[in-house]
Amino acid sequence: MGINLDKPQLWKSDINSSVDLYNTWYMEFAPKAFRETRISTTHSVEQALQETNYLNNISPAVLANHPEVLPILRMSTCPPIARDRLVGLAGVSKSLVQNMEDTEIPHVSPRMKKSQLIIELQRISNIIRKMADPDIFTWLPDSRNPDEDEILRSSTIVADRLCGAVADPIIRNAQEKRQLAAITSFLESKGYRLAKSGTHYDEMPAGTFSFHTNVPVFVAGTEGDKVNIPVDVAIMPLSTNKGDIPLFIEAKSAGDFTNVNKRRKEEAVKMQQLRNTFGNEVSYSLFLCGYFDSGYLGYEAAEGIDWIWEHRINDLEKLGI
């Protein structure tokens, strides 16, 4: 017997409750999450201004030594320049711009000849300098150094532009933290504890849980190479037996009905990979909060994927927790 996938008579009321929970959270906490990110981003912009001598020195050497300033520089122009637009305007390698904006380790292209690298960085510099917004960087037309008020004002404006471009990921990250905190609180109330960092999924002791755990699975069939897929939550029940596989849960939230139906196949693919590897009895469920309509729920139910609504978190007990 399922938890929610076989109870379509409850879906409509659950959808309404889920939407209400998400909207309540959004109105109260989303602005705070955005402001906190904007503050930290403002500091990054101020640092980039210092490294470029307040946009007076956007030389190839500065760009090579501080590639992390490029996305900030793109948002410093009038109008702001999209990544691919910069590639076209400057006539530079797309991989160079991508490498400089790598979210983990920004860097210049290591295999590019130094002479070519200098040429392309100079082209980027020329575009930024030509299009730098004089209404934001008011000191540039006068060829002078800015005062503290001008630095703060310009940094805040550019930070707003940067945050505006990634507003949805900021909200998603904040929502995921909140969902995982809710699961943590529930599990700890049942006597569970967080597994030690680095614990392999099949080495988790009974009564432990972990987040963002890599699980090796077969991509297709039951033979061949395995790939790691991330699972948001892995839970080893208190009553587990040796050799048991943890319960797997995917935390999902959505602020509108459109995007969930575009991405609903992702869970189906992950479920199939888990079944290919561990058999049809593997436990893989969704933890939902927000805008998930009957079309989405029907698709997941047809794939044999069950779910727990965050507004009824005690349903986690039905997984055998």
Image (cartoon, rainbow, N blue to C red):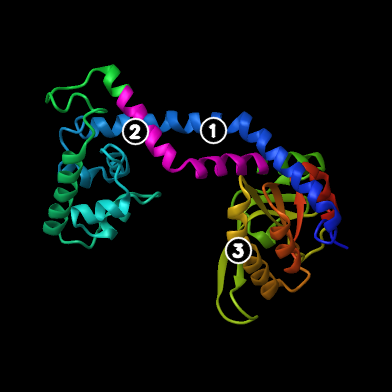
Disc marking residue 266: 3
- The mark nearer the N terminus, 2 or 1, is 1
**Residue at position x 71%, y 38% from top?**
21
Using the image, tell me which numbered label, if any, was put on residue 33: 1
The reply, left or right, for residue 10 in relation to residue 41 is right
Place residue 150 in its image quadrant.
Answer: top left
The three-letter code of the residue at mark 2 reads Val
The image position of residue 261, as x and y in percent, is: 62, 59
Residue 154 among those drawn in magenta: yes
> How much space separates mark 3 and mark 2, taking CA atoms?
35 Å
The stretch of residues the image draws in magenta is 153-179
For mark 2, does the 10 Å Cα neighbourhood hold few (<14), some (14 to 19), or many (20 or more) residues? many
Q: Is residue 62 visible?
A: yes
Q: Nearer the viewer, mark 2 or mark 1?
A: 2
Rendered residue at 28%/34% (across/down): 48
Judge the density around disc 3: few (<14), some (14-19), many (≥20) Cα neighbours within 10 Å. Answer: few
Residue 45 at what x, y percent from top left?
33, 32
Mark 2 — residue? Answer: 158
- Say above or below: 196 vs 113: above
